[in-house]
Image: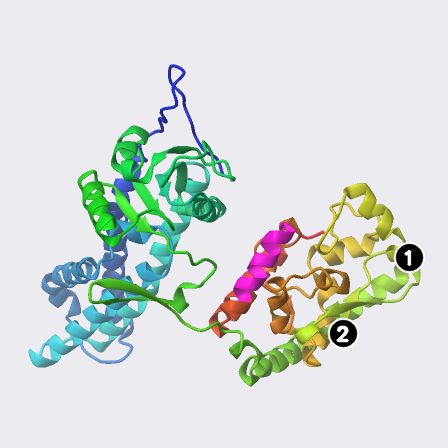
Amino acid sequence: MSLLVHRVGGGSRLRVPLPSRTLLYLPGTAFTLDAAIVVLATLAAVVGRERWHLLSAGAGLTEQMGHAGPLLVAGWLGAIWLAGGYATSLFDAGTDEFRRVARATFATAAAVGIGAFLLDLPLSRDFFVLAFGLGVPALLCGRLALRRAVQRARRHGALSHSVLIAGLPGSIDEVATVLGRESGLGYRVVGALTPTVSVTDTACGVPVLGLCTDVVEQVRRSGADVVFFASGGVSSSVEMRRLAWDLEREGVQVIVAPSVSDVSGERVHVRPVGGLPLIHIDPTGTIDAVRWGKRLFDVLGSAALILALSPVLVVAALRIRAHDGGPVLFRQVRIGRDGRAFPCLKLRTMVVDAEAHLARLHAETGHAEGLFKMAGDPRITRPGAFLRRFSIDELPQLFNVLRGEMSLVGPRPPLPTEVATYDDITSRRLNVRPGMTGLWQVSGRSDLSWSEAVRLDLFYVDNWSMFRDLSILAKTFGAVVGSRGAY
């Protein structure tokens, strides 16, 4: 995390640039993009209807749409606006943006269909199906492309928010760590405010600018446009309301960061009760992750992949045998669900006596914990380098999945020496079957630190869903083809 601090005239006043003015244009950019897509979808539906007559006969649609087309486009965009599809807070993260756009589009389709029926208008079914059939995915893809562009710009320092965090030092560091890790959100931490100024910097290096009660003054001095209130940031709901009013007059966004982290959005629900917003957290998905539905998916998926990839396995096995005459498979003891050991299968990619060199490499690299990986490992053979680059060496683990020792998606299978060092929190990784791929695979593989790999595994265990499994499998293909973090 980078903090921009400029000290003027020997003082400690923090000066940072105002947030990028381009942020103010994001809603307008989204509206322009949506308008172009809606117009193109409408024109494509007219052309398709006139040329192909897919579902009904008749002609003259072009003349009809000369009057109704602009009304449809205006109504469609108006529905997205009424659904909050251009709210400034939508363009950071989460799925709310896509849900609002999709909901507004389906509402428009329903209104058009019902209106045509009640008014007995000659609406072509071809046009209706084509317009909304093309419009829904095109709008969602357009919003996704816009978000990706914004995230790329933020990773290069543009389109960012300047953030103050108010709270206890420990809570400040928790929020700052998450914001620093999720650079695509564009939250640049410029300082912190604490209930009592006892330190000049937090443990993570966030400069403490003053007291939480001085938040309005510090916002003016720092140029921050977002204030996070973490645990300990306010002493009462009355004070929170007063500060929110004061910051509203300054045009500053207020965000309350509860003491909850690494919980997926699907499990969090805010339900106001008597004016008190209560955060409800649904139970973890750990139990569902070991039930028959996921197991059936693993059996069918692994069997299909074994059949489809058997030629690749045969060619790789022949190449390994021809290289040095050693064994094709490498069996390594790993720990699975509930602490049960099993032989994890891989195609051999190292020299036959690779384990004998491990202690020396540990000493040379200063390795202390976690699974040992190093770039340019001298033990890797020539065919092994290629197999590792595209993860072909891990294909025999499909047989581990078929036998029930592993899953297609799950935490990384740990070594017994790793498990011996686990604390109570880390041990939750063993509540589900380890996976051939997982969040660790699509988030950097060997480039991840040990603590980050553990965090991702625990997030998966607590927030499992079948949709997340399918998403990880889809992303795995890109990670493998791109060879990110593979060595």
Q: Nearer the viewer, residue 216 or 360?
A: 216
Residue 20 lies, in percent from the top left, at 32, 35
Q: Nearer the viewer, mark 2 or mark 1?
A: 2
Left or right of 444, for residue 465? left
- Position above or below: 106 against 303: above
Residue 368 is at least partly visible in this image: yes
- Which residue carries the number 2 mark? 342
Amino acid type for the residue under numbered disc 1: Asp
Colour mapping used in the image: rainbow
- Position above or below: 260 against 169: below
Is most of the magenta stretch helix, strand or loop? helix
Q: Identify the secondary structure beneath mark 2.
A: strand
Residue 407 lies, in percent from the top left, at 63, 74
Left or right of 368, for residue 284? left
Q: Residue at coordinates 41% horizontally, 16% vertically from top-left?
A: 10
Residue 270 lies, in percent from the top left, at 30, 65
Q: Quadrant of residue 12?
A: top left
Q: Please state the extent of the stretch shown in magenta in the rendering.
A: 448-460
